[in-house]
Image: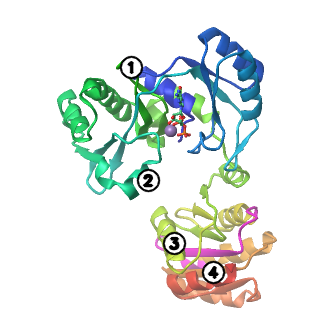
């Protein structure tokens, strides 16, 4: 679950990471109230879950009431890369001497936590990685040993962070690591982490993604649930209890099992297509489930073909086939289906599909995943 900046900062604050005083609001009057109480100058910041807000005009400095009104008025309702701004965060403006980058993530391949640190912050870290990869220090952390202040300081030194900022950066890294581990984050990122002219180090931005698997031990996360923004497809999928993630492409995907669903996205990409979604229908594939899945995919205006990729294990091929035939009757589909059915009783399943009398313009069956992907991508062109 991705947090908005203001939520990320409030989360940081719980772990003692210094952030600017501020508050969030949905109105211009609210923005004025906050600004008046924290004192000028303030920064008015669009709360959307997308980077590059500054460049898009979503972050403005205000030195008086008039400017707060003007900027909050402009920013509220603004569309930033398809995200409409519903809230602004108003915080005390900071003087910046330098901007750094710091983040913790899980490196699954290494089975360790990963610190990424750079003295070149404030810009996209992907940009730094592309232009000057040496400028990013990567440190793997054994989760049992944790991260000591001494080790954090060494990493900061290695990243060419100036002597004056080393202690402050190290202290924040240790706290950010606490936040990442005890706070059950998938990602805890500060960009920029700033050095003020006065020598203090401070988090100016916050990008936090929480690990949904840990929600059972965080009842306080409910408040973040409430602000999660789903698109219409995702809302429908949630109503229908489907494991669905909306993407931008044109090939609708239905697969059984998360691993197969991910492989399906890969194979669609591999043959030159783009997936419209991730959708794992799990173990079963009866008519109800298949109908729900097709309804969600059908609601996506970008979908031009549908790739159903099923490998029968416990789920038997003939049951899947019956489910698909029934679902195709129930849903008035806008796009053709390509199905690859393999595994347990696949032959019987394919026979059922072939005998169902569904025209080839609506449903075609392919024997392998690759052939099915090619056909689906061709149809989506
Ligand atoms: P992002 O562009 O969406 O990542 O938003 P950030 O919160 O990282 O802000 C982008 C940039 O705006 C920062 O790198 C700063 O250069 C600038 N900025 C944000 N807040 C302040 C502030 O309080 N003072 C100053 N001087 N600049 C700020
Ligand atoms: Mn940022």
Which residue does the image show at 27% across and 47% down from the upper left? 138
Q: Give the number of the disc on residue 126.
A: 2
Compared to 105, does 96 lie above or below? above
Label 2 or label 1, whichever comes before in sequence order: 1
Magenta stretch bounds: 299-318
Label 1 or label 3, whichever comes before in sequence order: 1
Residue 8, can we see it?
yes
Find out whether the residues at labels 2 and 1 contact each other: C-beta distance under 8 Å.
no
Q: Residue beneath label 1, please?
A: 16
Label 3 or label 4, whichever comes before in sequence order: 3
Q: Residue beneath label 3, please?
A: 264
Q: Nearer the viewer, residue 372 or 152?
A: 152
Q: Quadrant of residue 116?
A: top left
Which residue does the image show at 76% across and 37% down from the upper left? 77
Q: Nearer the viewer, residue 195 or 145?
A: 195
Label 4 or label 2, whichever comes before in sequence order: 2
């Amino acid at each position: 679950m991705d947090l908005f900046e203001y939520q990320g900062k409030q989360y940081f604050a719980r772990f003692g990471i210094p952030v600017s005083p501020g508050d969030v609001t949905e109105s211009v009057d609210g923005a004025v109230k906050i600004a008046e109480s924290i004192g000028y100058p303030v920064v008015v910041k669009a709360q959307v879950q997308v980077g590059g807000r500054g460049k898009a005009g979503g972050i403005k400095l205000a030195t008086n009431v008039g400017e707060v009104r003007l900027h909050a008025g402009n920013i509220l309702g603004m569309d930033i890369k398809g995200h409409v701004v519903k809230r602004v965060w108003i915080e005390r403006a900071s003087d910046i001497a330098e901007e750094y980058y710091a983040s913790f993530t899980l490196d699954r391949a290494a089975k360790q936590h990963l610190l990424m640190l750079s003295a070149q912050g404030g810009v996209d870290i992907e940009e730094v990685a592309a232009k000057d990869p040496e400028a990013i220090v990567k440190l793997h952390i054994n989760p049992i040993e944790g991260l000591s202040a001494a080790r954090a300081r060494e990493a900061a030194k290695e990243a060419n962070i100036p002597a004056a900022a080393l202690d402050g950066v190290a202290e924040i890294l240790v706290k950010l690591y606490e936040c990442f581990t005890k706070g059950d984050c998938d990602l805890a990122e500060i960009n920029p982490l700033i050095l003020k002219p006065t020598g203090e180090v401070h988090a100016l931005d916050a990008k936090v993604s929480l690990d949904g698997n840990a929600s059972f031990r965080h009842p306080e996360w409910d408040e973040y649930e409430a602000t999660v923004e789903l698109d219409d497809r995702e809302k429908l999928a949630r109503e229908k209890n489907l494991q669905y993630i909306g993407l931008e492409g044109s090939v609708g995907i239905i697969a059984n099992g998360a691993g197969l669903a991910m492989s399906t996205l890969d194979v669609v990409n591999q043959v030159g297509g783009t997936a419209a979604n991730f959708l794992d229908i799990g173990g079963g594939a009866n008519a109800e489930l298949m109908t729900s899945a097709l309804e969600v995919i059908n609601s996506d205006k970008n979908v031009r073909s549908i790739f159903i990729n099923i490998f029968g294990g416990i789920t038997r091929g003939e049951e899947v086939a019956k489910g698909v035939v029934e679902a195709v009757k129930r849903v008035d589909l806008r796009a053709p289906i390509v199905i690859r059915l393999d595994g347990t009783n696949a032959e019987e399943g394919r026979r059922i599909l072939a005998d169902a009398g569904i025209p080839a313009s609506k449903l075609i069956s392919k024997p392998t995943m690759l052939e099915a992907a090619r056909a689906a991508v061709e149809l989506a062109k």
